[in-house]
Amino acid sequence: MVGQSPAMCRLFELIRRFAPVDAPVLITGETGTGKELAARALHDRSNARDGRFVAINCAALPAGLIASELFGYEKGAFTGATARRIGLVEMAAGGSLFLDEIGDLPMDLQGHLLRFLQEGQIFRLGGREPVSVRTRVIAATHVDLRRAIGEGRFREDLFYRLNVLQLEMPPLRERDGDIELLAMVVLRAAARDLGLAVDGFSAGAMAALCRHDWPGNVRELVSTVRRAAVMASGRTIGEADLALPAAREARHRRATTGSHGMVDPEAVRAALARCGQNRARAARELGIARITLYRALQRMAATGHTEETSDEP
């Protein structure tokens, strides 16, 4: 984690305070702000640092396999279960369990997770005896969980179990002075990894980096700088190499997204229309993650109807 802005200094201080405390931590913030990096920093400074750091993306787990992936299963629990399998939660025993995108965990699995947090025990699928698991639990989300509770998509009791200690990751646009620092760190790494002889930015390029709103935050900055390093014709990255949108367009694109990834339905419809109903291209144009667009479409479908769309890149 790199930064020297007041926002990051406050974050670093909270990480130092929270790390040795054996209590759940909830990390919130926009997509691309470095929530997993913060979770790893907590683990590396915790009493569980000698154990495993097991990261689980709750949004990426196949719906029909979530229970078995998280909690494991016993031999004969279902067709094809020819041997006992240890789940990801049990693998984190003695270490840290990082539950990324916790807001996407199905309601029925939320109950199982709540019981684990309360009792420190799990049941493997097909098992009759509880298994005790002691692990540091760190969860992360870019979803407004209080809103999700009001909409019936997240359990209130689970929220309070997870939200004992909270870290809010600052968006890049609020990290005064960090863009220049981050850009140089990323450029040095890109030059080393890709074998390039690029070692700096022109004044215009750096000014463009500082003007941009960075809806994708640090993840977008890394992608932009690495691509520009490849495109640069000399040792210095120019403004044209960055291929950033105009400042007015960047501000307009940022205005389409709320403080918790809530996207304006009209902006979604307009982007889909411009992109021929292709969701992947529309998400890129809006400057949001594809899963954020999916959630916006689900909310729109609940209140009206949407046109048929495509996932093709």
Image (cartoon, rainbow, N blue to C red):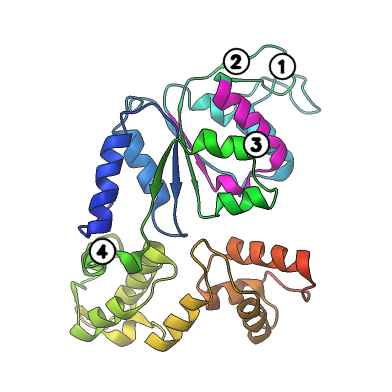
x then y, percent, for residue 312: 66, 71
Q: How far apart are the two marked residues, 4 and 2, measured between alpha carbons?
A: 44 Å
Residue 246 at least partly seen? no
Instruction: Mark 1 or mark 4: name the one nearer the start of the chain.
Output: 1
Res. 131 mark: 2
Identify which residue, 10 or 66, lies in the foreground: 10
146 versus 70 height, above or below? below
x then y, percent, for residue 12: 26, 46
Query: Who's the residue at 51% across and 26% down the image?
Result: 91
Identify which residue, 30 or 2, lies in the foreground: 30
Asked whether the beta carbons under mark 4 and mark 2 sit within 8 Å of each other, the answer is no
x then y, percent, for residue 43: 35, 34
Q: Nearer the viewer, mark 4 or mark 3?
A: 3
Asked whether the beta carbons under mark 1 and mark 3 sit within 8 Å of each other, the answer is no
230 versus 124 height, above or below? below
Query: Who's the residue at 53% across and 36% down the image?
Result: 160
256 versus 74 height, above or below? below
Q: Is residue 120 left or right of residue 209?
A: right
x then y, percent, for residue 183: 26, 68
Which amino acid does the dot numbered 1 rest on? Gly
Within 10 angstroms of label 2, few (less than 14), some, or many (20 or more) residues? some
Which amino acid does the dot numbered 3 rest on? Gln
Q: Which residue is mark 4?
A: 182
Q: Nearer the viewer, mark 2 or mark 3?
A: 3
Instruction: Mark 1 or mark 3: name the one nearer the start of the chain.
Output: 3
Q: Which residue is mark 1?
A: 127
Instruction: Mark 2 or mark 3: name the one nearer the start of the chain.
Output: 3
- Magenta stretch, main secondary structure, is helix
Which amino acid does the dot numbered 2 rest on? Val
The stretch in magenta equals 96-118
Res. 14 mark: none
